[in-house]
Image: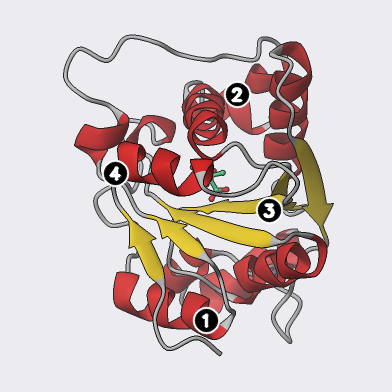
Amino acid sequence: MKDSIRVIDSIQEMREYRSLIYETKNIGFVPTMGYLHEGHLSLVEQSNKESDITIVSIYVNPTQFGENEDLQTYPRDIDRDLDLLCKYNVDAVFYPNNKEMYPEGYLTWVEVEKLSSLYCGRSRPTHFKGVSTIVSKLINIVRPLYLYMGEKDFQQIAVLKKMIEDLNYDTYIRPCPIVREIDGLALSSRNAYLNEKERRNHNDNN
Ligand code: PAF
């Protein structure tokens, strides 16, 4: 286990770090919004197995939250996250702020038509546009070979696979199995919001 972890908060430093990694080395990338759980850590483990370098990003992306959604209250605990990632021997963590990712005057969006408006997209009409935009930016900054994502987010994977194909990124999605709690509930950072009754209902509905 490492005793410290490299945390990079600027795009320029991330690019510099990336450019020092030989082209022959595989980079595995795990994009997250933090408040890490076993599901995220299973993605990190898979990346560690298959890649020479594992990079994790922690960024609560405001553009994928709708107006009345939980952006302000989304759970965050960066110190705990960094401790965990250190234990899992992650090579670097990209931890940018909003100014870095969406500077004043930001105007460019990536939208995967049709797929983004099905299922969850019906009730969250701007969600996948925010996800594909941020993931496209992160791929450009980190330039990973593999992108690790949980199968829990089935539609997210479908949207991003299409984006990667259509925009000719040299990156491949590695979908990883859902990790569940003992009672069967799929792990999610938002489970922190659920009380006992809501947990049971959630489980019964899944
Ligand atoms: O699945 C998530 O946590 C987010 O949608 C992602 C892929 C990190 C983009 O913000």
Q: Amino acid at mark 4?
A: Ser
Q: Is residue 192 left or right of residue 29?
A: left
The residue lying toward the viewer, choosing from 177 and 180, is 177
The residue at the point 31 percent across, 47 percent down is: 96
Q: Amino acid at mark 2?
A: Arg
Instruction: Give the label, 3 or 2, closer to the camera.
Output: 3
Q: Secondary structure at mark 3?
A: strand
> Within 8 Å of ligand 1, the CB of disc 2?
no
Q: Which mark is residue 196?
A: 1
* Residue underneath mark 4: 10
Q: Amino acid at mark 3?
A: Gly
The Cα–Cα distance between marks 3 and 2, rounded to whole angstroms, is 32 Å
Instruction: Give the label, 4 or 2, closer to the camera.
Output: 4
The Cα–Cα distance between marks 1 and 2, rounded to whole angstroms, is 28 Å
Q: Earlier in the sequence, mark 3 or mark 4?
A: 4
Marks 3/1 in contact by CB < 8 Å: the verdict is no
Q: Earlier in the sequence, mark 3 or mark 2?
A: 3
The residue at the point 24 percent across, 50 percent down is: 72
Q: Earlier in the sequence, mark 4 or mark 2?
A: 4
The residue at the point 39 percent across, 10 percent down is: 108
* Residue underneath mark 2: 122
When asked about the image quadrant of residue 1, the answer is: bottom right
* Residue underneath mark 3: 28
When asked about the image quadrant of residue 50, the answer is: bottom right
